[in-house]
Image (cartoon, helix red, strand yellow):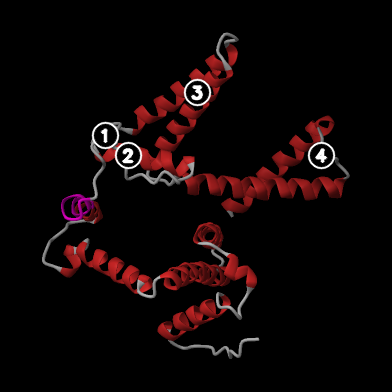
């Protein structure tokens, strides 16, 4: 048993340090076996999960939930910090120093006398410093060498397209992107209907369709992962409503009752639209 007394802190500095102290105790020999067994790879996954839970609280305007989920995000960040401290006591300090130096270096319009007119120029300055000052550019034979290979496919598609845009290779207007999505959809239909095409060809055409949809999100200024996350949440919510209503009306969810399920689905969609309009 570890002798520790929790205190409700009144300053951000004290609260952060108390969290870090608890994390170090959990990782100690007298701490929690599960926490000691965690690796940076596992905690990074937890961090991603908690970030999405925080995002859900933001999207639903749940203020209490935002506070709780933000705490979970900070917990996992602190856990990663402690893991690096365990192998190198200076690692955490170095990480914090590096990010502070980077923030100051990449904001000369704040910490120096450089002028910018808008946020678009801020991005231009930021990218120029990454390349010209920090030397962060692609390898000679791989334009996408700075796109992390561990990114999930949806995020990687978005990053590839952003890199291409920086090189000036982009659509002049949104209509071209809409047309490209329609073109890729038509190729999927053609591959599906043509029995001579191998299954891998259809899979590739489906991939091209997804890639063009990601490109459309990017061109219109939306994050494709967030857009898909919102759609997933909407589908879960609506189908759960259908599931509950079907149970109440004695309707079994199966192919034989598809007409009844469609009726319930349309009722729920209409109700949700009305609630949104109100």
Magenta segment, prevailing SS (helix, strand or loop): helix
Which structural element holds mark 3? helix
Q: Residue at x 26, y 32 (%)?
A: 169
Which structural element holds mark 2? loop
**Region of the chain picked out in magenta, as a range:** 127-135
> Mark number for residue 144?
2
> Mark number for residue 205?
3
Q: Residue furthest right?
A: 250
Closest to the observer, 128 or 5: 5
Work out whether 188 lies above or below 63. Answer: above
Estimate how packed mark 1 is, as few (under 14), some (14 to 19) or many (20 or more) residues with alpha carbons within 10 Å: few
Left or right, residue 233 beside residue 86: right
Q: Residue furthest top?
A: 196
Estimate the spatial distance between the alpha carbons at disc 3 and disc 4, rounded to whole Å.
32 Å
Closest to the observer, 66 or 73: 73
Q: Quadrant of residue 64?
A: bottom right
Labels 1 and 3: the sequence-earlier one:
1
User: Can the viewer see residue 214?
Assistant: yes
Work out whether 114 lies above or below 262. Answer: below
Which structural element holds mark 1? loop
Disc 1 versus disc 4: nearer the observer: 1
Q: Quadrant of the N terminus?
A: bottom right
Query: Is residue 100 part of the magenta span, yes or no?
Result: no
The reply to whether discs 1 and 4 touch (Cβ–Cβ < 8 Å) is no
Q: Residue at x 30, y 31 (%)?
A: 171
> Mark number for residue 64?
none
Estimate how packed mark 2 is, as few (under 14), some (14 to 19) or many (20 or more) residues with alpha carbons within 10 Å: some
> Mark number for residue 253?
4
Query: Is residue 128 part of the magenta span, yes or no?
Result: yes
Estimate the spatial distance between the alpha carbons at disc 1 and disc 3, rounded to whole Å.
27 Å
């Amino acid at each position: 048993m570890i002798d520790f007394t929790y205190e409700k802190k009144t300053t951000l500095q004290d609260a952060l340090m108390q969290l870090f102290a608890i994390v170090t105790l959990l990782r100690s020999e007298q701490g929690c076996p599960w926490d000691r067994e965690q690796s940076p790879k596992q905690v990074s996954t937890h961090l991603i999960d908690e970030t999405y839970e925080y995002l859900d609280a933001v999207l639903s305007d749940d203020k209490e939930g935002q506070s709780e989920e933000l705490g979970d995000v900070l917990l996992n960040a602190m856990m990663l910090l402690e893991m690096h401290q365990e192998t190198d006591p200076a690692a955490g300090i170095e990480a914090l120093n590096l990010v502070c130096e980077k923030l100051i270096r990449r904001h000369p319009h704040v910490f120096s006398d450089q002028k910018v007119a808008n946020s678009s120029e801020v991005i231009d300055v930021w990218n120029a410093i990454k390349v010209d000052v920090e030397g962060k550019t692609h390898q000679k034979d791989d334009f996408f060498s700075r796109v992390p290979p561990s990114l999930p496919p949806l995020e990687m598609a978005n990053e590839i397209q952003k890199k291409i845009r920086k090189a000036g290779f982009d659509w002049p207007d949104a209509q071209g992107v809409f047309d490209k999505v329609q073109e890729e959809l038509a190729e999927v239909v053609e591959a599906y209907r043509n029995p001579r095409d191998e299954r891998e060809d259809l899979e590739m055409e489906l991939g091209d369709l997804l890639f063009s949809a990601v490109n459309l999100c990017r061109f219109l200024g939306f994050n494709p992962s967030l857009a898909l996350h919102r759609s997933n949440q909407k589908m879960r919510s609506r189908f759960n409503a259908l599931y509950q209503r079907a149970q109440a009306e004695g309707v079994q969810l199966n192919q034989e009752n598809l007409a009844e399920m469609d009726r319930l689905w349309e009722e729920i969609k209409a109700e949700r639209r009305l609630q949104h309009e109100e």
